[in-house]
Amino acid sequence: METEMNVYTIDLICSFCDLDFTRSSCLKKHLKNVHAHQQGDLNEGILKEFSTFSEFVTWKEEEENKTMSKYVRQRGSKTLKNGDIVMNYHCCRSGTYKPKGKGVKSLKSQGSAKIGISCPAIIKIRVLKM
């Protein structure tokens, strides 16, 4: 009789020292405590305000084109008690390429966009209740 096993995959790798983490919260804590001096002013983040959601989407697309990156939502939105909506967009280049299938189809000519480490870049947006 076969039994299923829970297997934890370690795909969160520090870009500075190659340590492995199973949770993004642990990686973020590590980056803040150990590598803060290497990240410069990026720890504080940048605050931007937009009048409309479409204005934000336009800005995000321009930033993605400038930086050759892409930010995607991995989960749905969260509604806070006060009615505000919070959404997180994560860099889609984090992690390593994991083929799905039997290897019959070859990888695209440009290769994978995955960078083999965890990108801590995130865009957090808050849509205020009107």
Image (cartoon, rainbow, N blue to C red):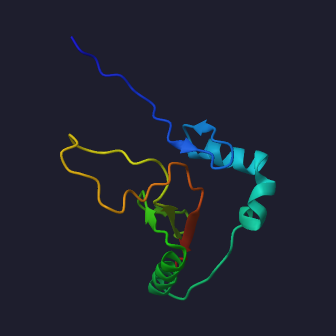
For the residue pair 117 and 111, the one nearer the viewer reads as: 111
- Does 54 sit left or right of 80 as displayed? left
Q: Position of residue 44 (x, y in %)?
A: 74, 65
Q: Quarter of the image containing the N terminus?
A: top left
Instruction: Classify 123 as above or below 35.
Output: below
Instruction: Classify 11 as above or below 86.
Output: above
Identify the residue at horizontal 70%, vertical 44% (top origin): 30
Identify the residue at horizontal 41%, vertical 60% (top origin): 76
Q: Position of residue 72 (x, y in %)?
A: 43, 65
Instruction: Classify 91 as above or below 4.
Output: below
- Does 106 sit left or right of 52 as displayed? left
Identify the residue at horizontal 44%, vertical 85% (top origin): 54
Q: Would residue 130 be visible to someone looking at this image?
A: no
- Does 16 sit left or right of 120 as displayed? right
For the residue pair 116 and 43, the one nearer the viewer reads as: 116
Identify the residue at horizontal 47%, vertical 58% (top origin): 93
For the residue pair 38 and 129, the one nearer the viewer reads as: 38
